Image (cartoon, rainbow, N blue to C red):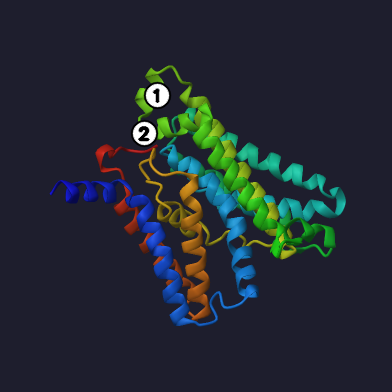
Amino acid sequence: MTQIGLSREWVQRNLNTIIPISGLLVLIIALRIANPYFLASWDSVITLVYGMSWFLIAACGLTLVILMGSFDFSVPSVLKLSAMIFAVLYPSLGFFSILVSLIVGLVFGLTNGILLARFNIPSFMATLATSMVAEGLAQVISGGYTRMITDPAFRAISTTMFLGLPSIFYWAILVWLLSIFMTFTTPFGRTIYAIGGNIIGTRLAGINVKKVRILVFMLCSLLASLSGILYAAQIQGAHMQVGVLDMIPLFASVVVGGTALTGGVGGVHRTLLGVLIIRWLDSGLSMVAIDLNVRMIVFGAIAIIMAILTIDRRRIKIMK
């Protein structure tokens, strides 16, 4: 009886890891049965790598915000705006346009953080508003047109092949590893967990919670901008449809990876699994001709189910 109890306790404690890994294995088997061409060649692997790499960078930033117990609905819009700025300015500024795009992302993150930390506006409301601003700016900058760049140096940022894989993959893995290092080994990273776990206790410990919240939102938007820049280089330009339907899959990838919406549980190290599941599922469903709207329903349902399974019920709270 004791061994059974310990086994149940171990399963419960590691549920956030067991579910994503099991889900990924089941997903691969199911997609292979549904379509034998799924992952059947190296070209198909490269296609999936392209599809998940830019997405992983944005998901890492969003994970940090959720880990802190907040939300950021502006990620896809900031991603789009940064991609558009990069594509529009590149012909005249060259690679200096990357710096401009990243600065714009930081400004949006700073705004989101200040609205939450200084003015106590709930993060979902603040970031929803700033996302509308980013969408409007992208529309104005683009003029409503797709901006294409034919310069090979433009695409080389993301498409240069090394050891059989495109450079955007290495950018994504680097961001993922640095994010893991930060959250597990630095005081700043541990503070993110602390705020998500017990914000009142963190304040009483003398930690400047407002400052940390602002910095996390800035980091999230910075990674969204980087993701947009690399994605623009990957597709050879930018258009207004970038990021339009990515909010639900982004949130789904974070919670599927095992980061609880209540904050303080999970982390960036789990997000890679969630991204693999969501992006590979999206690719597999599209390969068997499942309509995009149906895929959005599937992602939403997955996000809800995983939120229920991974939520920390010991500490249900109202998140700002």
Circle on res. 315: none
Camera-side residue of 86 and 283: 283
Amino acid residing under circle 1 = Thr
Q: Residues within 10 Å of mark 1 (few under 14, many from 20)?
A: some
Amino acid residing under circle 2 = Gly
Task: Please give the name of the residue rendered at 73% of the width and 51% of the height, measured from the top-left corner.
Answer: 85
Camera-side residue of 230 and 241: 230
State the residue lying farthest toward the right: 92
On the picture, is 152 further left or further right than 168?
A: right
Quarter of the image with the C terminus is: top left
Image spot of residue 117 (x, y percent): 48, 29
Whole-angstrom CA distance, mark 1 to mark 2, is 9 Å
Image spot of residue 84 (x, y percent): 71, 55
Task: List the residue tagged with mark 1.
Answer: 202
SS at mark 1 in the image: helix
SS at mark 2 in the image: helix
- Ranked by sequence position, the earlier of labels 1 and 2 is 2
Image spot of residue 262 (x, y percent): 35, 42
- Whether residue 114 is visible, yes or no, is no
Task: Please give the name of the residue rendered at 61% of the width and 46% of the height, measured from the top-left corner.
Answer: 175
Camera-side residue of 46 and 251: 46
Task: Please give the name of the residue rendered at 52% of the width and 32% of the height, measured from the top-left corner.
Answer: 185
Image spot of residue 280 (x, y percent): 51, 67
Task: List the residue tagged with mark 2.
Answer: 197
Quadrant housing residue 166: bottom right
Task: Please give the name of the residue rendered at 75% of the width and 42% of the height, measured from the top-left corner.
Answer: 99
1 and 2 marks in contact (CB < 8 Å): yes
